[in-house]
Image (cartoon, rainbow, N blue to C red):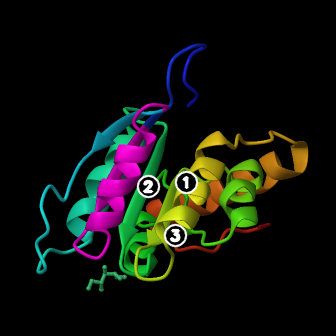
Amino acid sequence: MRPSEGSKLRVVFGADHGGFYLKKEMTARLKGNYEILDIGAVSFEPDDDYPDFVVPVAETVVSGRAQRGIIICGSGVGACIVANKIPGIRAAICHDMYSAHQGVEHDDMNVLCLGARVIGTELATELVIAFLEARFSGEERHRRRFEKTLAIEKQALSGGGGKKEGV
Ligand code: RB5
């Protein structure tokens, strides 16, 4: 889903204790250019659990209340694993600039996962902007792969596992 002409892209952020301070800094930096929804954590709680923040971010994106999601944990790994359990989410950890935009252009990635213990604030900011400014190319070969990916998800949801004939 794309924002209409002139309106700001709506972006939902979530983070556990591992990503709490980076989220705070990111949302402060980006709020002038994007409409930011922050689903928490609202305070630093060293014992909180990343799945509790990933699911609301994922649901916000799937429902269309935000066009993109950003989830920050210590490594980005836990966030990414959980996010990809939610149908309709295409999440990846991107700690390099190429993947941050190419993941959208080729794969229609809708959630970016970051590891606050792995990358610094400046790189994180550039990665987030590259992700948010990228658009799915819509080229035939990327659409074809996207459709195959959706078919695998549909098959898994119907109880047929990940294997689909002809894929
Ligand atoms: C929390 O300590 C840490 O395990 C979590 O933020 C994340 O890195 C998991 O992948």
Asked if ligand 1 lies within 8 A of label 3, the reply is no
> Looking at the picture, does residue 36 appear above or below residue 118?
above
Cα distance between the residues tagged 3 and 1: 35 Å
Q: Which residue is mark 3?
A: 160
Q: Amino acid at mark 3?
A: Gly
For marks 3 and 2 on the same chain, the one whose residue lies earlier in the sequence? 2
- Confirm whether the magenta stretch covers residue 2: no
**Residue 85 can be seen, yes or no:** yes
> Looking at the picture, does residue 53 appear above or below residue 67?
below
Cα distance between the residues tagged 1 and 2: 8 Å
Q: Secondary structure at mark 3?
A: loop
Q: Are marks 3 and 1 in contact (CB under 8 Å)?
A: no
Q: How many neighbours does mark 3 have within 10 angstroms: few (below 14), some (14-19), or many (20 or more)?
A: few
In this rendering, the count of numbered labels is: 3
Percent position of residue 131, x then y? 62, 51
Q: Residue at x 55, y 58 (%)?
A: 90
Segment tinted magenta in the rendering: 11-33
For marks 3 and 1 on the same chain, the one whose residue lies earlier in the sequence? 1
- 7 vs 122, nearest the viewer: 122
Asked if ligand 1 lies within 8 A of label 1, the reply is no
Residue 70: which numbered mark, if any? 2
Left or right position of 97 against 38: right
Percent position of residue 144, x then y? 81, 50
* Mark 3 vs mark 2: in front: 2
Q: Amino acid at mark 2?
A: Ile
Q: Are marks 1 and 2 in contact (CB under 8 Å)?
A: yes
> Looking at the picture, does residue 160 appear above or below residue 134?
below
- 123 vs 49, nearest the viewer: 123
Left or right position of 83 against 101: left
Q: Which residue is mark 1?
A: 128
Q: Secondary structure at mark 2?
A: strand
